Image: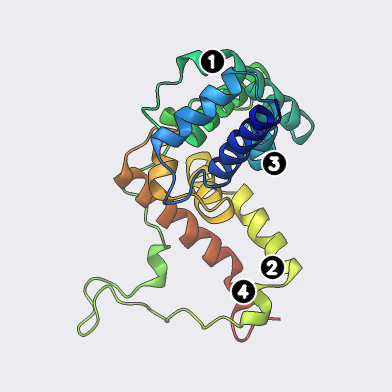
Amino acid sequence: MVRDSARLQSAASEDVASLEALGTPGSTRKEDRRLVAAIRAGDEGVFICLVKRHHRAMIRLARAYVPPGAADEVAQEAWIGVLKGLHKFEGRSSLKAWIFRILINCARLRGAREARTVPFSSLDEDPQEPAVAEERFLDAGHPRWPGHWLKSPEPWMDERLISEETLSMVARAMDELPRAQCEVMRLRDVEGWTSAEVCEALEISEANQRVLLHRARSKVRQALEPYVSAGGS
């Protein structure tokens, strides 16, 4: 009896350890399937750890689609969807990407009911949109430096970059981005996802993800320049 209990505790510890590795380079589809199997078998501890790991990020992502007060409800709906859909998980994508796809679908449905969102794939992204305003570059007919910077970007002071005021400005600048750019930047730069994970969760190509991220970062930098440049105040 004691040995059986010890074996169960050991197995549970292994599941939690595997959960802690989710989303890291060492995590595997095999580990994802094992965690799913543990939750299906009724291991509440593994499921609680999964919720603790992702719930806050899910709320942050949901806020792009619904009012802040509804974001937690959307995240809870998503977890219900995760439990109901575990039998459908086949390991073709990572468990994290699968969970966040459910969250995004729930958020879109809720947002659509409140007329606040449109499908990600239909968001107006102009493929010819420049990442940086054209007026910041020399004319293509310039005799010596065609297309070069009119004035090089100013160096930024580190102490300004880490201030709470700057972080608030970053958040506001991200809120002003087109939805697709905002979501890619939030997942990459706020949540720390890899490009592959973002592509899986948002179901976009690597090239599209790269373009969206570059445009988003460029726009946020441009919004912050007046404050964080060496001569800013």
The Cα–Cα distance between marks 4 and 2, rounded to whole angstroms, is 11 Å
Label 1 environment density (alpha carbons within 10 Å; few <14, some 14–19, many ≥20): few
Q: Which amino acid does label 4 sit on?
A: Pro
| Contact flag, marks 3 and 2 (Cβ < 8 Å) | no
Query: Which numbered marker is on residue 226?
Result: 4
Q: What element carries label 4?
A: helix
Q: Name the residue under label 3.
A: 56
Between the residue at mark 4 and the residue at mark 1, the CA separation in whole angstroms equals 48 Å
- Badge 1 amino acid: Gly
Image side of residue 40 versus residue 207, left or right: right
> Mark 4 or 1, which is nearer the eye?
1
Depth check, front residue: 60 or 118? 60
Q: Position of residue 224 (x, y in %)?
A: 60, 68
Which residue sits at x=57%, y=40%?
Answer: 14
> Which numbered disc, 1 or 3, marks the residue closer to the eye?
1
Disc number for residue 5:
none
Quarter where residue 39 is shown: top right
Q: Which of marks 2 and 1 is in front?
A: 1
Q: Residues within 10 Å of mark 4 (few under 14, many from 20)?
A: few
Q: For marks 3 and 2, give the CA distance.
A: 22 Å
> Nearer the N terminus, badge 2 or badge 1?
1
Mark 3 or 2 closer to N-term?
Answer: 3
Residue 74 spot, x, y in % from top left: 69, 25
Quarter of the image where one finds residue 93: top left
Q: Which of marks 3 and 2 is in front?
A: 3
Q: Which amino acid does label 3 sit on?
A: Arg
Residue labelled with disc 2:
166
CA gap between label 3 and label 4 equals: 32 Å
Instruction: Please indicate, yes or no, whether residue 64 appears anywhere in the rendered image.
Output: no
| Callouts 2 and 1 close, C-beta under 8 Å | no
